[in-house]
Image (tube, rainbow, N blue to C red):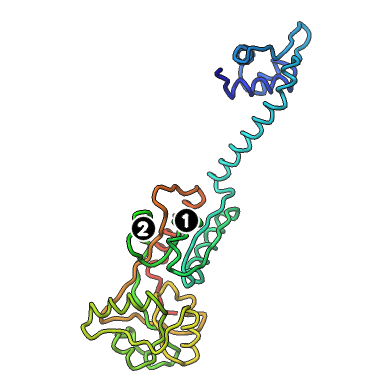
Amino acid sequence: MNITLRQLRAFIAVARSGSFTLAAESLFITQSALSGLIKELEQSLGVRLFDRSTRRIQLSDIGRGIYPLIDKILADLDGVLDEVANLKALKKGVVRVAAPQLMACTLLPEVIAAYRAEHPQVDIRLIDCAVESVTSRVFSGEVDFGLGPERDPNSDIDATPLFELPFHAVFPPGHALTARETVRWADLVDHPLITLQGQFTERLSVDLHTAMREGDLDPATTVTFMSTALSMVAAGLGVTICIPYAASLVRLYRLDMRPLVEPVVTRRFYVFSRNGRSLSPAAQSFREALFGYVAREGAFTGHP
């Protein structure tokens, strides 16, 4: 049995109009082509669907029985096709993105706002989480993709470079470092240093030790969130270090930033996705918008 959509649509059109002429016009085909489709359908099913006379056409008993079933099948199919068209046209869709807390409260809201201005019907759901759990959420399928600093290689996760930026020193206005265009890492020794716990400080210590034989971090305080570190700096309890994509948060705390040099230490950030898993049209569109935003913003200058 080889039944086609064209045959089913022809059956519904004739059943609704009660006329081969009107049905052919509604389908934009000739009457002979319509008659051929109905004949093929009846032959495939092995039953007569219409009772024909010289004066009228009406559904047979079997035709009346299967009409609501076929009508529902075509309505459901049209609904699916409309859904796909809306998703392709970005008239709807859901995008789930995982990002570390700092990136989720600085870079991502700006990107989401710019994207929503162009695609207001796409729902962007931001999952702010610990940096260590970003790739696990990508792997589990909880999110479409994630953002974060470089991680150990994983054959199941694709890591596409997003940007690479140098560390900056952060301190209050009027601080002894304010007059400098750049700050040396060695200059931080003279001030209480507040850094983040975990891999942030551990990886940075390794980088500094590699670049400077005597270079190392000796934090006075370590905290979990950058917002805590910035609050402490604003209260005059020390200085901290961060990546300049967080400049908007630094400005919110009314603090100053300067590039750290001798050596210049950078950190790479990536977009993480699951290998072998394609993105929805909305997710792919938002991913492209993210890369476009980063390209337009350049180096995310840290000077307020």
Look at label 1 and name its amino acid: Ser
* Residue farthest toward the top in the current orientation of the protein: 54
The vertical placement of 241 against 68, above or below, is below
Mark 1 Cα shell of 10 Å, populated few (<14), some (14-19), many (≥20): few
Name the residue: 51% across, 83% down.
253
* Marked residue nearer the N-terminal end (2 or 1): 1
Mark 2 Cα shell of 10 Å, populated few (<14), some (14-19), many (≥20): few
Place of residue 294 in the rendered image (x, y in percent of width and height, measured from the top left): 41, 63
Q: Which residue is mark 1?
A: 140
Look at label 2 and name its amino acid: Thr
Name the residue: 35% across, 77% down.
167
Give the position of the N terminus as an image quadrant: top right
Place of residue 156 in the rendered image (x, y in percent of width and height, measured from the top left): 37, 54
Place of residue 175 in the rendered image (x, y in percent of width and height, measured from the top left): 41, 92
In the image, is 215 to the left or to the right of 66? left
Contact (Cβ within 8 Å) of mark 2 with mark 1: no
Label of residue 237 in the image? none
Q: Nearer the viewer, residue 17 or 81?
A: 81
For marks 2 and 1, give the CA distance. Answer: 19 Å
Q: Nearer the viewer, residue 261 or 179?
A: 261
The vertical placement of 196 against 42, above or below, is below
Number of callouts in the render? 2
Where, by quadrant of the figure, is residue 298 drawn? Answer: bottom left
Place of residue 90 in the rendered image (x, y in percent of width and height, measured from the top left): 55, 48
Label of residue 160 in the image? 2
